Image: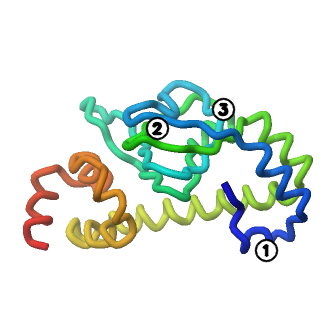
Amino acid sequence: MQIDKSIIEHYRLSGEEVHQTLSSYTPVSMDAGEFFLKQGKVSDAIAYISKGLLRAWFYNDRGEEVTSQFFPEGSLVMSLESFNSQIPSKENITAITACELMIISYQRQKELYDLVPAWNQICRDLADLNSRQMMERAERFQTMSASGRYQLFCKEYPQVLLHARLGDIASYLGVDIATLSRIRRRK
């Protein structure tokens, strides 16, 4: 795992702070289908994805899986509300492919805030970014057609198209699998 040079420069992290950060993470491998987090459990870790793909999902009122988020390589995996508030998660997070993760525990993250004060701001900025992304996604559901959402998804997540099940993509886009199949045939 490496810290992006722009983050080091923007938050003015010293060499020691970079070392403290990197030494706080532990490498973990996951098999496809394995749970990173189960609904009802408190999220006690954040992971950086070095390799692989995960997805967050929950059951709707009909007992169907609904995909709420995909986590491709290079992203952070967490259930934000569960991790920050230490409350049971409303979602599941599972590996779609075999994954290589770098994990930091909730306790170690709290210690890192004291060791590297810049992480307080970095995490606030990440939470703001996550909030903006959720607002943009909600706006897309209200303003874009299903076909437009699929085209944007293809552009933003080409690696997900290679590994995720069609039903998972359909639920993420808010359409049924038959509608997604029609959209894909027209493309």
Query: Is residue 119 placed above or below 56 in the rendered structure?
Result: below
Residue kind at label 1, given as amino acid type:
His
Residue 57, given in percent of the width and then of the height, sits at 39, 40
**Residue drawn at point x = 66 percent, y = 54 percent:** 1
Q: Residues within 10 Å of mark 2 (few under 14, many from 20)?
A: many
**Residue drawn at point x = 30 percent, y = 49 percent:** 164
- In-image side of 108 versus 14 (left or right): left
- In-image side of 181 versus 114 (left or right): left
The secondary element bearing badge 1 is classed as helix
Q: Are marks 3 and 2 in contact (CB under 8 Å)?
A: no
Real-space Cα distance between discs 3 and 2?
13 Å
Residue kind at label 3, given as amino acid type:
Asp
Residue 143 in sight in this render: no
Residue 138, given in percent of the width and then of the height, sits at 41, 62
The secondary element bearing badge 2 is classed as strand
Q: Quadrant of residue 31?
A: top left
Q: Are marks 1 and 2 in contact (CB under 8 Å)?
A: no
**Residue drawn at point x = 59 percent, y = 37 percent:** 28
The residue beneath circle 3 is 44
Residue 48, given in percent of the width and then of the height, sits at 60, 50
The residue beneath circle 1 is 10
Colour setting: rainbow
Q: Earlier in the sequence, mark 1 or mark 2?
A: 1
The residue beneath circle 2 is 93
- In-image side of 12 versus 127 (left or right): right
Real-space Cα distance between discs 3 and 1?
28 Å
